[in-house]
Amino acid sequence: MLDRERTALVVVDVQRAFAKAVAEFDRVAQATRKLIQAAHLLELPVVVTEQYPQGLGPTVESVAELLDGDLRLEKRRFAACDAEGFELFGRSQVVLCGIEAHVCVAQTALLLLRRGLEVHLVVDAVASRHERDREVALRRLEQAGVVPQTVESVLFELIRGADHPRFKDVQELVK
């Protein structure tokens, strides 16, 4: 179960070049926005990566506009955790989202697992250019030990109940 004190959000490559190539891109961007907003409300560290932004463009504006003081990293290797400067600020649980599910997201998840971290993949906040690649990646990652979650399940698990001081703010995000 996710614990706010142990959790970090990692956003992988929600970039301009994927906006036209990935069929579910808008859904992923919107779900990612909710996760970032919740992370800020709950004071979770946020790490955002961009795969070769000189060629694939920056993080899309709808997501980038929310980033304020968050760790933003450029990378050339597929796994986000291989990016220079990558850190989770002592957190042992990772909420993971982004693009593409079968490449950068999958390699990030598998390496984080190998490093002994608990990985929660937000399935409604990941996509690939081809749905088959996404489906296979989700199955593979679950078999490897990744915990599948949805945006809503992550948000409510992090606050645990209606008695949390940020409950109403979090509830607004899922309406």
Image: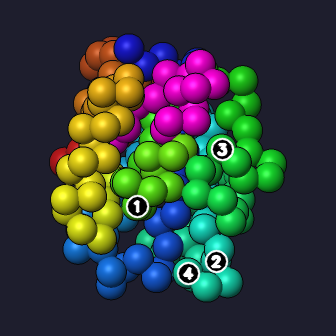
Question: Which residue is identified by label 3?
Answer: 81
Question: Which residue is identified by label 2?
Answer: 53
Label 1 environment density (alpha carbons within 10 Å; few <14, some 14–19, many ≥20): many
Label 4 environment density (alpha carbons within 10 Å; few <14, some 14–19, many ≥20): some
Q: Position of residue 155 (x, y in %)?
A: 34, 33
Q: CA distance from mark 2 to mark 3?
A: 17 Å
Question: Which residue is identified by label 1?
Answer: 100
Relative height, residue 99 to residue 84 (above, below): below
Q: Position of residue 98 (x, y in %)?
A: 43, 56
On-image quarter of the N terminus = top left
Q: Nearer the viewer, mark 2 or mark 1?
A: 1
Q: CA distance from mark 2 to mark 1?
A: 15 Å
Give the amino acid type for the residue marked by disc 4 in the picture: Leu
Q: CA distance from mark 4 to mark 3?
A: 19 Å
Q: Position of residue 130 (x, y in %)?
A: 24, 68
- What element does badge 4 sit on? helix
Marks 3 and 1: CB-CB under 8 Å?
no
Label 3 environment density (alpha carbons within 10 Å; few <14, some 14–19, many ≥20): many
Given residues 64 and 117, the one toward you in this image is 117
What span is in magenta? 109-123
Left or right: where does residue 122 sit relative to residue 85? Answer: left
The image quarter in which residue 19 lies: bottom left
Give the amino acid type for the residue marked by disc 2 in the picture: Pro
Given residues 138 and 163, the one toward you in this image is 138
Q: Earlier in the sequence, mark 2 or mark 3?
A: 2
Give the amino acid type for the residue marked by disc 1 in the picture: Glu
Left or right: where does residue 69 sit relative to residue 128? Answer: right
Give the amino acid type for the residue marked by disc 3 in the picture: Cys
The reply to whether residue 107 is in sight is yes
Question: Which residue is identified by label 4?
Answer: 56
* Residue 120 among those drawn in magenta: yes
Residue at the extreme right of the image, as rendered: 85
